Amino acid sequence: MRKVGILGGGQLGTMLAEALFALDAQVRIYDADPRAPGVRRLREAVSAPWSDQAAVGRFVEGLDVLTYEFEHIDGSPLRALGDSLRIVPSIRVLEVTQDRALEKQFLAASGLPHAAFAVARSEAELREAANRLGYPFILKTIRGGYDGKGQFHVAGHEDLAAAILALHERKSDFSCVLEEIIDLAVEVSCIVARDETGAEVTFPLFENAHEGHILDLTLVPARVPAEVAAVVREVALRTARAVDLEGVLCIEFFVGRTAARRSSGLAAAGLHVYVNELAPRPHNSGHVTRNACTASQYDVLARVLLGLPLHEPQLVDPTGSYCMGNLLGDVWIEQGRGAPGQGLDLSCWKDHPSVVDVVLYGKTEPKPRRKMGHFVVRAADADTALAEARAFRDHLRGR
Ligand SMILES: Nc1ncnc2c1ncn2[C@@H]1O[C@H](COP(=O)(O)OP(=O)(O)O)[C@@H](O)[C@H]1O
Ligand SMILES: [Mg+2]
């Protein structure tokens, strides 16, 4: 029996564990938080700080392979393990994707389409980079940013002054990336899986809508012209090959309405394709694959980890649509169930037969903006799927 270790016991690590169990693997999960879903749900779970080298050492003992569910972990202790242990995706992939500057530089060096950017490491460099790139731009802190954390829309000098003040107040270091703003028609993501032998598969494209910088709804298949979908898939595969991926990689794309002035997009069907960012792990938008595809992102990663053959995931219903909606802690709070340990009232589900799945992650404390669960709608077409998803969530919120 193969032994797999997962760093991170959130929803992604926990759903990966389920897929691994289905293939009869043995799974161990590590999370600093003893209340993390994976730590509570798995028998073989370790909870200790990330910096506890002795605990990490014991955790990896006897493992055949180690993977991780999020990229914001310190790669240095892992680098020390890398010689004796198979780590998937590799440390190089982790290091490139956890640092926005390295990620952008990787895209540029690999000739992959991306938004024009400038990197700054200090306040003075930030002012200089702003002048060089020109307004408006989006400022993103280099490390630790996700779900729009550490991002500023900078339209001119006044916004820059406000962003600098905010960075001072947060005692944040000034390492950041400045990006030209893309005139978005739509955002899509593409998951690629690649194994040790270089065999590769891609998932159907997802169309993503964000609210307050957090993923809100994912629609499959994405409503983009076939020509754009072909370019996105090709760029996704080129990206995976360029980092020599083993594992899964989710590539977020911007599809622009107009050609951005300073950026190098790929034109298709009158639209413009740019890589936004990379995640070397299962992705929030990929939850929908559990219902919409013949194999989920978790199943496919499990096969890579266990050395089993890959098959191109197909849409279960090629003529219909699926929509995944995130359930944030706000929904619990709006139901008056914000206290720790209070479950979500799902009684209105009976009025929404198109909702084929609800997944609750087992996080004990609902907080605003915290991802606590998701649901999936199956419908005959995209508009119905989106409308049903919105109606179900409004109903849960008592609206
Ligand atoms: N250069 C840009 N042009 C237009 N919109 C952007 C740009 N950068 C970010 N955004 C918007 O902000 C969202 C979050 O940015 P992203 O870089 O993906 O950070 P995160 O790590 O928080 O997901 C994007 O999905 C997009 O909606
Ligand atoms: Mg993103």
Image (cartoon, rainbow, N blue to C red):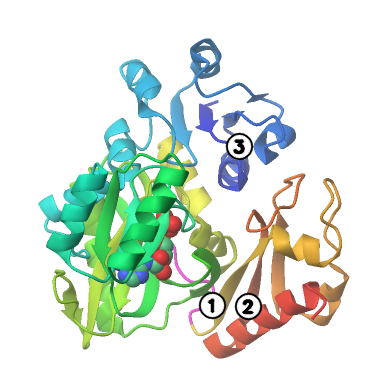
- Could one spot residue 62 in this view of the protein? no
From the viewer's perspective, is residue 352 above or below residue 114?
below
Q: Residue at x 71, y 58 (%)?
A: 329
Specify whether 42 is left or right of 255: right
Separation of marks 1 and 2 at Cα, in angstroms: 9 Å
* Drawn side of residue 354 relative to residue 113, left or right: right
Q: In which quarter of the image is the N terminus?
A: top right
Q: Nearer the viewer, residue 153 or 356?
A: 153
Say which of marks 2 and 3 sits in front: 3
Q: Which of 271 and 135 is in front in this view?
A: 135
Residue linked to disc 2: 378
Give the labeled residue for mark 3. 9
Q: Distance between the residues labelled 3 and 1?
A: 31 Å
Q: Residue type at mark 2? A: Arg
Picture residue at 27% right of the left edge, 53% below the top: 177
By secondary structure, the bulk of the magenta-drawn segment is best described as: loop
Query: Where 258 falls versus 229 (above or below)?
Result: below
SS category of the residue bearing label 2: strand
Which numbered marker is on residue 121? none
Q: Note whether residue 112 is visible.
A: yes
3 or 1: tag closer to the N-terminus: 3
Marks 1 and 2 close (CB-CB < 8 Å): yes
| Front position in the image: 163 or 399 | 163
Q: What residue type is labelled 1?
A: Asp
Residue 317, disc: 1
